[in-house]
Image (spheres, rainbow, N blue to C red):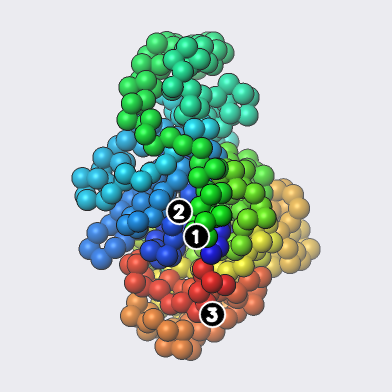
Amino acid sequence: MPAIVLVGAQWGDEGKGKATDVLGSRVDHVVKYNGGNNAGHTVVVGDEKYALHLLPSGILTPGCTPVIGNGVVVDLSVLFEEIEGLSARGVDCSRLVVSASAHLITPYHRTLDKVTERFLGSRRIGTTGRGIGPAYADKINRVGLRVQDLFDEKILQQKVEGALEGKNQLLVKVYNRRAITADEVVDELLSYADRLAPMVADTGLVLTRALDAGKTVVFEGGQATLLDVDHGTYPFVTSSNATAGGACTGSGVPPNRIDRVVAVVKAYTTRVGEGPFPTELTDEVGEGLRRAGGEFGTTTGRPRRTGWYDALVARYSARVNGVTDFVLTKLDVLTGYERIPVCVAYEVDGVRHDEMPMTQTDFHHAVPVYEELPGWSEDLSGVRRFEDLPRAAREYVLRLEELSGARISAIGVGPDREEIVVRHDLLEG
Ligand code: GDP
Ligand code: IMO
Ligand code: MG
């Protein structure tokens, strides 16, 4: 029984939540290993639509144990709000396990996220404003607060006081904000301690034991490859490792336990926030894709930037993540185009690039080289077998497969759990 990492291949919102949900009842544990409530996963089950931020998508599968790994940054107010919201709709959240070593997002992280963005002005990242960057910065600076600190009041007080010393200087003197007292932070955090206690565990140990017992574990990446702090379009990235390597550091499960890496890739491209995007369409064609695909952020409601499929991005993702299978989503959204351009290379200052350029300067200057594929006009949402797709849609998939560096094992033809065409079993390989 395998350990599978599931990641986003582009700039996020590829449909990772749905892909995890589709694996469904055969999965024993779903682990979130990076990011926090900057993520937004929409999962549609029949008439019900769920928007998940901090909780792993596995929460929707009865019998599956959702795990928040050590690599996640946890905003406790969001955690309990989400648990309450789902419980009220009849979703059982009682199996949730939270790592004792996960870091906490506090009110001062949220404040700092917003004020630094405002001060960056035109150089802003376009963050989700959830305090993600500042919480990870504290982790790396070794002044972060962790879940386990809630159970040692003396240490918690000391750590909060230490963290606030520098931050209050910054908030008051640079950003003209009010100082935050250690007591208000400690009181808020402690108000969650009793409810959190039964969920807290050594999640690395829990997961290793589960794998030893032959269970199936899915590691669900938040964000995506090009938003990865090391491998993405830095500085227009998030502050964690969203790529497959992050599944190990963010969960405590070693690399030699991972069997498969599934990357979710959209049949076109979207991006939220600032940063380079070579195939972006800023005209009415892009507007059409946004409308057809419902491309508005699950977390912030911002309109997503849209563009054609970029095979260099997919190929880069295949390489960086060690992708064994792609799940191609939203093929249905491309219905109705006479011809569909696909980016097969870039031109940078007159030089052709067949791989991601080495520097961000070149990437900012990349001009897409397009190949045009014939489109189709049939509705795809009822199709369940690859052979039943219109010929042009099949050829589109096969061409992307050829260009993207790994096989396309499943194809999304609609938002619902059932709306998928499976070519190869993602769990069995
Ligand atoms: P995630 O962050 O990667 O989980 O993706 P999001 O949930 O933010 O965005 C993906 C959106 O596309 C959601 O609204 C899904 O319901 C929807 N979706 C997923 N797969 C498909 C598909 O194959 N076709 C269509 N039309 N919608 C899909
Ligand atoms: P899912 O998991 C799309 C983007 C933000 C911003 C940058 C940094 O739903 O795919 P942050 O708040 O993380 O410091 O913002 O990253 N971003 C996402 N874009 N999908 C996401 O998550 C994202 N999470 C962060 O828009 O550009
Ligand atoms: Mg999303």
201 or 279, which is in the foreground? 201
Q: Residues within 10 Å of mark 2 (few under 14, many from 20)?
A: many
426 or 407, which is in the foreground? 426
153 or 158, which is in the foreground? 153
Quarter holding the C terminus is: bottom right
At a point 44% along the width and 11% down the height, the residue shown is 182
Q: Amino acid at mark 1?
A: Thr
Check if mark 2's residue and mark 1's residue have beta carbons within 8 Å: yes
Q: Where is mark 3, residue-wise?
A: 396
At a point 63% along the width and 55% down the height, the residue shown is 257
Percent position (x, y) of residue 148? Answer: 48, 27
Question: What is the CA distance from the residue labelled 2 to the residue labelled 1?
Answer: 7 Å
In this picture, is 97 found above or below 396?
above
Q: Amino acid at mark 2?
A: His
Q: Where is mark 1, residue-wise?
A: 216
Check if mark 2's residue and mark 3's residue have beta carbons within 8 Å: no
Q: Which mark is residue 29?
A: 2
- Which of the marked residues, 2 or 1, is nearer the chain's N terminus? 2
Question: What is the CA distance from the residue labelled 2 to the residue labelled 3?
Answer: 34 Å
Residue 184 falls in image quadrant: top left
Disc tally is 3
